[in-house]
Amino acid sequence: MNGKTADVGTPQAKTGAAMVLGGGIGGMEAALSLAESGIKVYLVEGKPSIGGVMSQLDKTFPTNDCAMCTMAPRLVAIGRHKDIEILSMTDVETLEGGPGHFTATLRKRSRFIDEGKCTGCGTCVANCPTRNKVQPLPATAVEVEPRFRDKAREIVERNRGRKGLLMPILQEVNSAFNYLPEDVLSFVSRETGYPLSHIYKVATFYGAFSTVPRGKHLVSVCMGTACYVKGGERLLEKFSDRLEVKVDGTTRDMKFTLKSARCIGCCGLAPAVMIDNVVYGRLSVGDVPKILDKYKGA
């Protein structure tokens, strides 16, 4: 509404309109309940879409229900309801008045699209010149540590000319050095033309990548719902005590890095731990020392 005011009532006659702030699962349910009562609802959300944190979850505690299965019917109902108007990318600047007579000033940020014509097909994202076009960078010198230099050059040359080469390069670099060194990422940026900011966006998004040195063995303790209720937290504490590191920490001898994983896909073996690519299931805290002993000499 770009700074305009919206009068949602007068002291003499209430209009029957309501404004719900926040499009999370609570805001969605509130909007539906009000709309079903015959009230016009303005659902105001600061982000590009509604759904909130719940849209980022896999399952919900304690029922272990699928988060999307809970949210999807509400998304469909809101989208179809004639009395619910979604105002995304919108901030509330001022709110004045009292019950039955509120005046709200909203500011709607530009989306650079015609929302009335958008079908959510994703074509604009696939063809966005800013996001996808690789711009050639000036040939500036990048100093790569000698221990990384030859292998990094070999990885880049092997993938040069390949379509979508960034992800394979990052995977090979991560596998070769057990993390993504800063100077190697700068080298990859110069050689491929991808902006360094874009490379870091990819490198920090995926949990399999790390921009800090990791130990030789990655210990991932599952903290998903099934593992958590069967003692995953106690296992994590035991590994932390035994290795003398906190979560996301690496031992001084660079042998182990301890991670807390959201889910490793082995709910039937809960509580479970994955070390490198090996899964250990149905564990107790007493199993931790003998498991670690297998890797101390490796």
Image: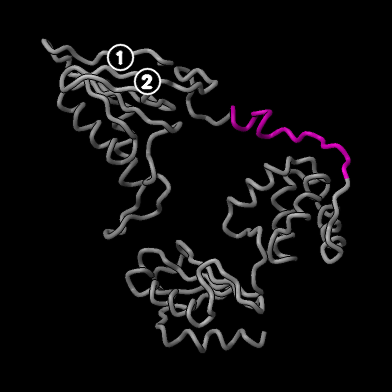
Q: Quadrant of residue 101?
A: top left
Residue type indicated by callout 1? Ala
**Looking at the picture, how far across and down is residue 238, in whole percent?**
44, 80
- Which three-letter amino acid code belongs to the residue tagged 2? Leu
Toward the viewer: 71 or 240?
240
Is 157 above or below relative to 237?
A: above
Q: Position of residue 197 (x, y in %)?
A: 68, 42
Q: Which residues are magenta?
A: 124-140
Q: Secondary structure at mark 2?
A: strand
The residue beneath circle 2 is: 106
CA gap between label 1 and label 2 equals 8 Å
Residue 73 at what x, y percent from top left? 30, 39
| 31 in relation to 257, above or below | above
Which residue was labeled with disc 1? 6
Look at the image and say whether residue 289 sits in the magenta stretch.
no
Q: Are marks 1 and 2 in contact (CB under 8 Å)?
A: yes
Q: Classify residue 290 as left or right of residue 231.
A: right
Q: Tell me the residue at 38%/34% (across/down).
A: 50
Residue ID at (23%, 20%): 40
**For mark 2, does the 10 Å Cα neighbourhood hold few (<14), some (14 to 19), or many (20 or more) residues?**
many
Residue 148, image quadrant: bottom right
Mark carried by residue 124: none
- Mark 1 surroundings within 10 Å by alpha-carbon count, few (fewer than 14), some (14 through 19), many (20 or more): few
**Rendered image quadrant of residue 9:** top left
